[in-house]
Image: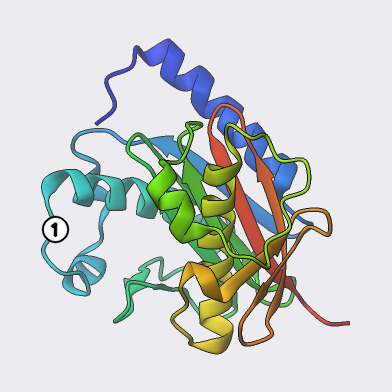
């Protein structure tokens, strides 16, 4: 749970918001929030009814993410801002909108767009720390093309990008994917799933690792 001094917290939050804005394609809006004790109050009754019972810390993180998403929906003029949880944990967005929510231990982020701007989007946030070697062995696939990724943070970046790519692919294909089912080519800025879904991917590494994946609308 967040225990940072308020000034430092606001500064980091502003930096994350700027990084997120820098990744966003046209039509996508986003926000972030430090997770605070009591943020579970932002889970709407209908949302809570769609979620399994969770530990207080997990509910606070969920509430922080929903709070950001509710505000993004309000700015879009959405009357019903409830974002229910699907059977596989995926957020169900109001008609005409696509979006994604993520959190690490301290920060939550959310992004939304109109479905006539993007077909789907996924976001992930991770601490800017190396990924444990045993987990990196699970995440990496022979088809990945890592280019000149930072060798210290490359595993964590790959993890975040694949998480975002899965979130963006699921609403389109309804397929549960493992890390081995997503190949990332950082030189092309693209992820391809084992079902042939192609997604644009972007990432930032400071002050945390942010990853964004999306499918553009075909014109």
Q: Nearer the viewer, residue 87 or 45?
A: 87
Q: Is residue 136 left or right of residue 5?
A: right
Q: Pinpoint residue 121: horizontal percent, then vertical percent.
A: 61, 66
Residue 173 in the image: above or below residue 38 = below
Mark yes or no: residue 73 visible.
no
Kindly identify the residue that appears in the image at 53 percent across and 33 percent down.
Answer: 208
In depth, the one of 132 and 3 nearer the eye is: 132
In the rendered view, how is the structure colored? Answer: rainbow
Q: Quadrant of the C terminus?
A: bottom right
Work out which quarter of the rendered image holds the N terminus and state it. top left
Classify 126 as above or below 145: above
Identify the residue position indicated by label 1 in the image.
Answer: 54
Q: Residues within 10 Å of mark 1 (few under 14, many from 20)?
A: few
Q: Residue at x 45, y 35 (%)?
A: 127
> 105 or 180, which lies in front?
180
Q: Where is residue 137 drawn, in percent x and y?
A: 47, 55
């Amino acid at each position: 749970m967040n225990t940072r001094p308020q000034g430092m917290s606001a500064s980091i939050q502003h930096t994350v918001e700027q990084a997120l804005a820098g990744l966003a394609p046209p039509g996508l809006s986003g926000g972030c929030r430090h997770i605070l004790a009591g943020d579970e109050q932002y889970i709407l009754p209908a949302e809570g009814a769609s979620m399994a019972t969770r530990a207080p810390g997990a509910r606070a993180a969920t509430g922080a993410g929903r709070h950001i998403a509710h505000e993004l929906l309000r700015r879009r003029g959405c009357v019903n801002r409830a974002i229910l949880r699907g059977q596989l944990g995926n957020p169900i967005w109001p008609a005409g909108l696509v979006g994604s929510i993520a959190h690490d231990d301290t920060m939550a982020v959310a992004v939304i767009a109109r479905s006539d701007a993007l077909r789907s989007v996924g976001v992930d946030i991770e601490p800017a720390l190396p990924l444990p070697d045993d987990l990196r062995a699970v995440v990496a696939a022979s088809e990945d093309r890592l280019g000149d990724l930072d060798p210290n943070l490359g595993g964590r970046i790959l993890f975040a990008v694949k998480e975002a790519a899965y979130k963006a692919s699921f609403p389109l294909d309804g397929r549960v994917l493992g890390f081995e089912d997503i190949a990332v080519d950082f030189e092309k800025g693209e992820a391809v799933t084992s079902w042939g879904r192609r997604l644009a991917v972007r990432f930032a590494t400071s002050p945390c690792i942010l990853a964004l994946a999306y499918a553009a609308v075909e014109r």
